[in-house]
């Protein structure tokens, strides 16, 4: 069994800074867990505490049922794959992969067999006699992974292993890592700041902010049922749209116009004693070109609004329309500022993103009528960021 359990694990530095606060996490044997969040959230620190590269200030860490707090990294039976490949330039690929086996004094025949198996799994058999300088970035990362695989450890710990690769190669390596983890059945803890990697790789996501877990669960759960503004803003690409809304007796008043609320949403507002103003969240895919919607579903009763297309991105299978909502739609929120990691060009104005069918006739610089389903919205409390829709 390679179950990893963190029970109230805390990392506090001598200057009083708390990097990770009372983290409770149970990682099942053979599970693939993703630690994700913006820079400085504590994800790498958590990984380093599991590895033994950082001391644990409080709490307990167990791997396979054995307490690991005081054990040295070499005694924890884990293998790490880092962002930097850390390969020995004077060694061949085969020698690099076999290096941990040499340290463990494994026999030459057994070592060669393990290297061949790892190379076959990673499709680098043809590179075994080359040196790292003659390999591409993706090939070097596969060598680094091969070095971890041959150890047959209790767990793999991966710290942003794909961040040095280009976008296309990252997609290929993502697929390979997922397939490899399922094949080997090794408990894996994977750190990334890329929420696309998090959504596509893990069995469960642990989303962190300022050393505290904001939400953990299957990727679909974080996407469809975010606990707060930070989770809603961080998970999803493009991100969820956010609008200020005044709560009225008839529903909500927004820059898109009045939005009626369902009975479920009204109960949530009443049960949580919602303030007079809330934040509405709605995913880009909840919008559609109203012309196409009417053609395909003439009986529909969704809401519509007309906006000016400031930017249009056509990706072949879909289009993204960026609608300028002006200064009246702008939102100031520390929860969203950290979720977006500062990627906001003009915080004095608001922009709505709609994911459209490729058949849409949307044009840059022209107005478009968009259709959206009011039942697809989430409501958030501005101060705390709590998702009111989830707390009925």
Image (cartoon, rainbow, N blue to C red):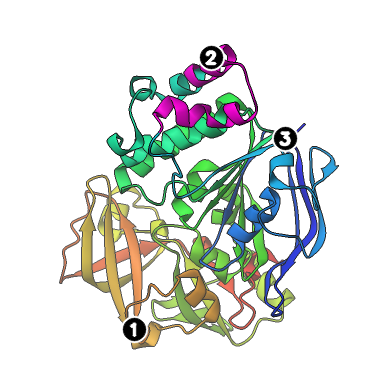
Question: Which dot marks residue 29?
Answer: 3
Residue 175 in sight? no
Q: Looking at the image, is mark 3 or mark 1 earlier in the sequence?
A: 3
Q: Quadrant of residue 138?
A: top left
Q: Residues within 10 Å of mark 1 (few under 14, many from 20)?
A: some
| In this picture, residue 49 sits left or right of residue 336 | right
Q: Secondary structure at mark 1?
A: loop
Whole-Å distance between the Cαs marked 3 and 1? 48 Å
Q: Position of residue 362 (x, y in %)?
A: 20, 61
Give the residue drawn at x 63%, y 60%: 45
Front-lying residue, 105 or 382: 105
Front-lying residue, 203 or 99: 99
Q: Secondary structure at mark 3?
A: loop
Instruction: Give the foreground label among 1 and 2.
Output: 2
Whole-Å distance between the Cαs marked 1 and 2? 61 Å
Q: Position of residue 16 (x, y in %)?
A: 71, 79
Q: Quadrant of residue 182?
A: top right
Q: Residues within 10 Å of mark 2 (few under 14, many from 20)?
A: few
Does 104 appear in magenta?
yes
Q: Are marks 3 and 1 in contact (CB under 8 Å)?
A: no
Front-lying residue, 322 or 193: 193
Residue matched to label 2: 113
With respect to residue 12, does 84 lie above or below? Answer: above
Residue 373 in sight? yes
């Amino acid at each position: 069994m390679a179950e990893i359990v963190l029970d109230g694990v805390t990392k506090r530095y001598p200057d009083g800074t708390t990097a990770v606060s009372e983290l409770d996490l149970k990682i099942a044997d053979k599970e693939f867990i993703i630690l994700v969040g913006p820079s400085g959230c504590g994800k790498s620190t958590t990984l380093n505490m599991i590895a033994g590269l950082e001391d644990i200030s409080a709490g307990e860490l167990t791997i396979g049922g054995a307490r690991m707090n005081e054990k040295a990294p070499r005694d924890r039976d884990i293998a790490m794959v880092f962002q930097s490949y850390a390969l020995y330039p004077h060694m061949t690929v085969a020698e690099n992969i076999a290096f941990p086996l040499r340290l463990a004094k494994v026999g030459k025949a057994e070592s060669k067999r393990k290297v061949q198996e790892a190379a076959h799994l990673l499709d680098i058999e043809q590179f075994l006699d080359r040196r790292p300088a003659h390999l591409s970035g993706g090939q070097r990362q596969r060598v680094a992974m091969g070095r971890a695989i041959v150890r047959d450890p209790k767990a793999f710990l991966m710290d942003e292993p794909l961040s040095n690769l280009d976008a296309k190669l990252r997609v290929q390596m993502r697929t390979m890592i997922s397939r490899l983890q399922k094949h080997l059945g090794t408990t894996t803890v994977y750190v990334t700041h890329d929420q696309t990697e998090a959504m596509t790789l893990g069995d469960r996501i642990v989303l962190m902010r300022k050393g505290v877990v904001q939400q953990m669960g299957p990727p679909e759960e974080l996407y469809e049922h975010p606990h707060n503004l930070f989770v809603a803003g961080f998970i999803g690409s493009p991100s969820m749209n956010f609008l200020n809304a005044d709560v009225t007796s008839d529903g909500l008043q927004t820059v898109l116009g009045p939005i009626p609320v369902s009975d479920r949403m009204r109960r949530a507002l009443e049960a949580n004693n919602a303030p007079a103003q809330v934040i509405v969240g709605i995913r880009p895919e909840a919008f559609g070109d109203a012309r196409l919607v009417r053609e395909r579903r003439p009986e529909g009763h969704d809401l519509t609004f007309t906006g000016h297309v400031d930017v249009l991105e056509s990706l072949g299978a879909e289009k993204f329309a960026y609608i300028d909502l002006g200064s009246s739609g702008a939102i100031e929120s520390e929860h969203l500022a950290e979720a977006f990691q500062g990627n906001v060009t003009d915080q004095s104005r608001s922009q709505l993103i709609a994911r459209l069918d490729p058949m849409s006739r949307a044009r840059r610089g022209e107005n478009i009528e968009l259709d959206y389903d009011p039942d697809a919205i989430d409501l958030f409390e501005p101060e705390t960021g709590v998702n009111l829709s989830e707390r009925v």
